[in-house]
Amino acid sequence: GVRIGKNCKIGPNAYLRAGVSIGDNCHIGNCEVKNSIIMNRTNIPHFSYVGDSIIGRNCNLGAGTMVANLRFDGENVKCTVKERKDTGLRKFGTVICDNVKTGVNVSIMPGVVVSSGSKIMPGEIIARDI
């Protein structure tokens, strides 16, 4: 199922797939979100994909921000919590902490952790934790 918090603006053309939880005061526009947690006051307004991810509070994903949730080689995704570890998951997107902004056409690779307050410039490919 899908859970949508209070005072959210959803659409037009939002595709919310199973396992999505959206916090309060969010804007989810013309994008696809799958099996992800989107926390309060976060905006994913234009042409983005977020799958198998956790997006913190007060984030804004610029148009065309894409979260990869499957490694190109098909191996399990590795993620850093103190040290880099195998998640045991074949599909896992990203953990984006609070107050992060991405520019247009940003790509975030599987298992990447984006630190609080990060600003990602347009067109960047984020393949390592920042």
Image: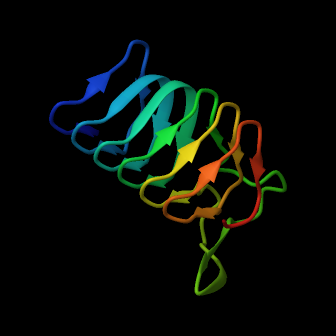
Which of 46/36 is in front? 46
Image quarter of the C terminus: bottom right
Residue name at image x 15 percent, y 36 percent: 6
Q: Residue at x 17, y 31 (%)?
A: 7
Q: Is residue 100 above or below residue 50?
A: below
Hey, which quadrant is residue 79 in on the image? bottom right
Q: Position of residue 66 (x, y in %)?
A: 65, 38
Q: Quadrant of the N terminus?
A: top left
Residue at 69% x, 39% y is 106
Total numbered labels placed on residues in the image: 0
Compared across the picture, whether 10 is left or right of 127 comes to left
Q: How is the image coloured?
A: rainbow
Residue most extreme to the right = 73
Position of 80 compared to 75: left or right?
Answer: left
Q: Is residue 55 above or below residue 121?
A: below
Q: Give the left or right position of residue 100, taking residue 42 as reference.
A: right
* Residue 5 rendering spot, x and y as whole percentages: 19, 39
Residue at 65% across / 60% down in the picture?
Answer: 90
Quadrant of residue 3 within the rendered picture: top left
Residue 122 image offset from top left, x and y in percent = 71, 37
